[in-house]
Amino acid sequence: MKRQPIAILDACVLVPMPLADTLLRLAEPEALFGARWTDRILAEVTRTLETKFAKSPEKARYREQAIREYFPAALVHHYEPRITEMTNHPKDRHVLAAAIECKADYLVTFNLKDFVTPPSSSRLPTIVGPSTFLKQLWSLDRLEFDRRLRQQADAIGMSVEHLLDRLANAVPTFVESIRSS
């Protein structure tokens, strides 16, 4: 059986709920990819939910706790020594260091511009936006991907079309690809 791709999910893709929900559902067993993150990434998600989206500390921490509970093997450790080797934007060096430490195939972020200067001697992940990443996963197994979207829509009490409308705010080119196929 082919190994599933590994992807570091930057905090910015774990904040918008429809996108985070979709990504996490795709990472559930039998996973279409292996999701990875760090304590620092999860703390940033919580902080962003509180400060930029006015979520209560309890609601913001609830998401972090749920992610930790459902994906205990996703946490990357021992990446900190690599941070000083990174030459990308300083605020995102920890993300790239973690991606390299866990041998991620992908680093999924909205902040592509923060990763333009790669370290010179490391095995680099492919740095992609979430639309590109979702299109890649969809192309690997359309039937399973579509099944997961239907399950997500059912679980939150809406149609797949309404779910796609909500996802279009964060990943418009992905939604356009699905709708045009």
Image (tube, rainbow, N blue to C red):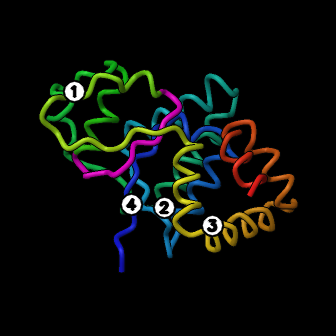
Q: Residue at x 69, y 33 (%)?
A: 55
Between label 3 and label 1, give the one nearer the viewer.
3
Spatial CA distance of label 2 from label 1 is: 30 Å
Look at the numbered disc 1 and give the secondary structure of its residue. Answer: loop
Q: Residue at x 38, y 36 (%)?
A: 40
Q: Nearer the viewer, residue 134 or 79?
A: 134
Q: Amino acid at mark 4?
A: Pro
On screen, residue 173 versus residue 164, left or right, reads: left
Between label 4 and label 2, give the one nearer the viewer.
4
Q: Residue at x 22, y 46 (%)?
A: 101
Mark 2 surroundings within 10 Å by alpha-carbon count, few (fewer than 14), some (14 through 19), many (20 or more): few
Residue at the spot of label 1: 86
Please say if the residues under marks 2 and 3 sit with CB atoms less than 8 Å apart.
no
Q: Quadrant of residue 146?
A: bottom right
| Disc ID at residue 103 | none
Between label 1 and label 4, give the one nearer the viewer.
4
Q: Residue at x 79, y 62 (%)?
A: 153
Residue at the spot of label 2: 69
